[in-house]
Image (cartoon, grey):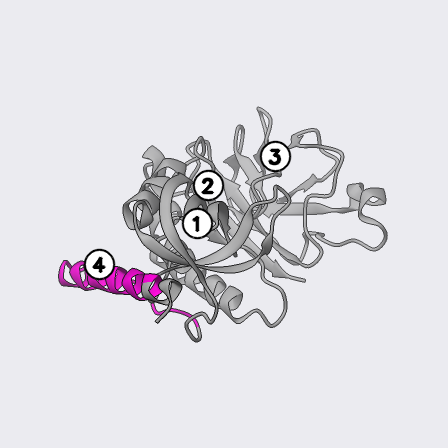
Amino acid sequence: MTCIGRWLLISLLIAGCRLAEESEAGVAGPDTPGTLPGEVTTGMVIRVNDGDSLVVETRSGEVEVRLMGINAPESYECYGQESERRLVELVEGEQVGLEEVGRDQFGRTLAYLWLGDRLVNLEQVAGGLAIATTPEVGDVRGETLLESEDQAYESGLGMWSDTVCGASGPPPSVDISGSVSSFDPPGPDDEVLGQEWVALSSEEGVDLSGWTIRDESSVHRCLLPGEFSIVSGAERIVASTDPCWDPGDSSVWNNGGDMALLLDTAGRVVARLRYPG
């Protein structure tokens, strides 16, 4: 057996022992999607940056990793610190396997992260610690992540809880109307920003001052201004040209599929709509 082979075997044995210990303690991970990975790069997690990125020491040196197919809240956002803390507890100092997919815009390695036979990307989504990002057509693991997000949302886990980040009481009844929203108007995106919008509706009058609309990425955020409200039974349009967006003057919604979230002032998710490409 080669040195690399022995290292991988030791890594999997260590992770397997850890899985057994957690199972005895009543902590069970979700089923992994499809088959286990083929080619992986093994290494030790030396630092967790946040809920979806970390640094792994491999035989070739340090690798900065961005977990494929998920997006955790930023550290300053609601549930961001909890997401990071859970990833630290799960993998920091552990031997892991990197199933590399590519590179992101910052040059980080996009990868599925395996702790033994546990897919860490999936565990973050299943626990309500991150959202799933819209996968390419035919991406089986990406589709499994979406299904896991649905389950976490329906169960009110983690960031999907009604009492998250100090929120109290039932959230107001507000919907994001998929039939009225316009996520991919005809024409080049930058030329039709005024025709790209999200539609909010409610059967009761709701004050949304200081609430946030966001997409599934870590980029686009709209902080609704003061005295922003919905009249009972009416709809309120927020276009991509509205000054609330940061950054502004650009397309917000992906044509290939995306998710719109409406968050109250505590950061609690009050409405959620995912649309396909």
Mark whose residue sits in front, 2 or 4: 4
Mark whose residue sits in front, 4 or 3: 4
Residue 100 in the image: state x and y as whole percent. 52, 59
State the CA–CA distance, disc 2 to disc 1.
7 Å
In depth, the one of 230 and 60 nearer the eye is 60
Q: Amino acid at mark 3?
A: Cys
Q: In the rendered structure, which disc, 2 or 4, sits on the residue that comes first in sequence?
A: 4
Q: Are marks 3 and 2 in contact (CB under 8 Å)?
A: no
Residue 270 in the image: state x and y as whole percent. 46, 45
Q: Which residues are magenta?
A: 7-33
In depth, the one of 224 and 139 nearer the eye is 139
Secondary structure of the residue carrying tag 3 is strand
Quarter of the image for residue 79 reads: top left
Secondary structure of the residue carrying tag 2 is loop
Q: Residue at x 37, y 36 (%)?
A: 81
Magenta highlight on residue 233: no
Q: Amino acid at mark 4?
A: Arg
Say the numbered circle drawn on residue 222: 3
- Look at mark 2 in the image and give the residue it sits on: 73
Quarter of the image for residue 82 reads: top left
Magenta highlight on residue 25: yes
State whether residue 128 is above or below residue 81.
below
State the CA–CA distance, disc 2 to disc 4.
27 Å
Q: Are marks 2 and 1 in contact (CB under 8 Å)?
A: yes
Q: In the rendered structure, which disc, 3 or 2, sits on the residue that comes first in sequence?
A: 2
Say the numbered circle drawn on residue 18: 4
Secondary structure of the residue carrying tag 4 is helix
- Look at mark 1 in the image and give the residue it sits on: 130
Q: Residue at x 74, y 54 (%)?
A: 184
